[in-house]
Amino acid sequence: MPVELLPLLMFVVICLVLMLGYPVAFSLAGVAMIFAGIGISIGHFDPSFLAALPNRLFGTINNITLLAVPLFVMMGVLLEKSRLAEELLDSMASLFGRLRGGLGISVVAVGMLLAASTGIVGATVVTMGLLSLPSMLKRGYDPALATGTICATGTLGQIIPPSIALVLLGDTLSSAYQQAQLEMGVFSPKTLSVGDLFIGALVPGLLLVGLYMAYVLGVALLQPHRAPPADDLKAPSLGHLLHGLLPPVMLIASVLGSILLGAATPTEAAGVGALGAALLAFLRGRLSLSLLGDVSRETMKVTCMVFMILIGAAVFSLVFRGFGGDELIHEAFHGMPGGVVAATAVVMLVIFLLGFILDFIEITFVVVPIVGPILLMMGVDPIWLGIMIAINLQTSFLTPPFGFSLFYLRGVAPASVATSDIYRGVAPFVVMQLFVLALLAMWPELATWLPAWIRS
């Protein structure tokens, strides 16, 4: 094999290693160091590249934007463990459940609100799987429709802000955007903030919610036996509705409103959200030292996982660039028939296929830093690219064999629900996500007009 293809071989090897189930962070760093050793031994890798690693890690530690990750995680875990999500689901079910397809609509509505107040896919899928799936099956819902709706709405936490995925993607794209401008000789580069991605994701996210609800209603009308009404549910009182709906809505308004109005950065808004979730738990009488201990441990686990993967990805991308991998891809994209359109389509296809075997964090930290600067140098709008990647990554939670939403729900679903039911159930929602991706490709304004309007 020509030594020029070593970076591509390194990428293939890391995909194979991750498919074998080895820890992501250590696999990324380990494979990179092995290839760096091989490159040094054959005289094809300059070891001075590795000298830049301490500065990269120090920059990661000092990155204020990434501080939003543990704060948003803490907010989500607090809402889950204080049972606010459970109250929200009860309120929605009592409001819509007596309609044909009403329980499915309530699951989508709750998924949207949980996504906008937590941004954690796993917590949303598991919570709704435990609370709503038995209720839907008991009332005669088709298992495929019930499981598909729960899995798909759980992934809304990927695209509806505040989203941890958007925080990580925004930070990665921001660096790529600055790098692209410097490569083009722009020494006063424009910036891309996580807040820009949050604003740009609102319209596509709400469009997905509307499509999910339309699908559930369509099934209920055309195949009523798959989504019967829950006649045993009583109409809720106004007090019951306000008790369940008002707290999360106020939290969403405080977090997103502060970002949209420019009153706070996403990191500051994450602090507001974590404090707000703690206050809600306190007002419900559920805040205790035991609860805080559980929340802190869960937050620490998720945060450590994210940052260890970030460190491993930093080593991987450094060695990849040391082998000239970025130049190889740059030449391939620029020599591709169809120019920027073909290059973007290839990147989206690669990300979609990688979603079958890799997690969104791995794709964000490994693939985006490689292809992002090249696409941005070709004139692609950074906000549009970020939202396209985010929706594409959202499908990775639903695509077999390693779709994480499928695993989360399989873990809490009753034995009577077959795995094939879950796979059949998510298929229409994957098609809807790809449809929104196609709409964004044809009308980039779906992602770009709102950030432009707010800036003006």
Image (tube, rainbow, N blue to C red):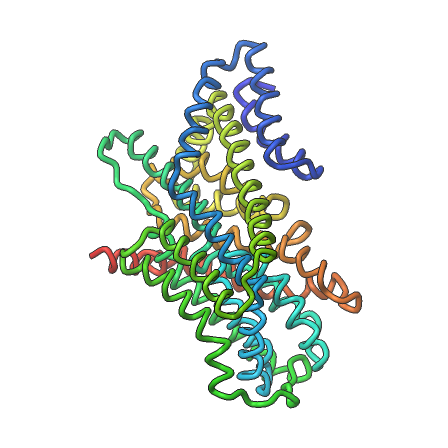
At x 43% / y 48%, what residue is drawn?
68
Total marks shown come to 0
Q: Position of residue 300 (x, y in %)?
A: 56, 45
At x 40% / y 46%, what residue is drawn?
170
Please, which residue is most extreme toward the right here? 415
109 or 245: which is nearer to us? 245
17 to 354, vertically: above or below: above
Residue 145 visible in image: no
Instruction: Please identify the quadrant where the N terminus is shown.
Output: top right
At x 59% / y 83%, what residue is drawn?
97
Q: Is residue 140 left or right of residue 68?
A: right
Q: Position of residue 255 (x, y in %)?
A: 38, 60
Q: Is residue 445 left or right of residue 231?
A: left
353 to 40, vertically: above or below: below
Residue 122 sits in which quadrant? bottom right
Residue 455 sits in which quadrant? bottom left
Q: Is residue 59 left or right of residue 452?
A: right
Instruction: Please identify the quadrant where the C terminus is shown.
Output: bottom left
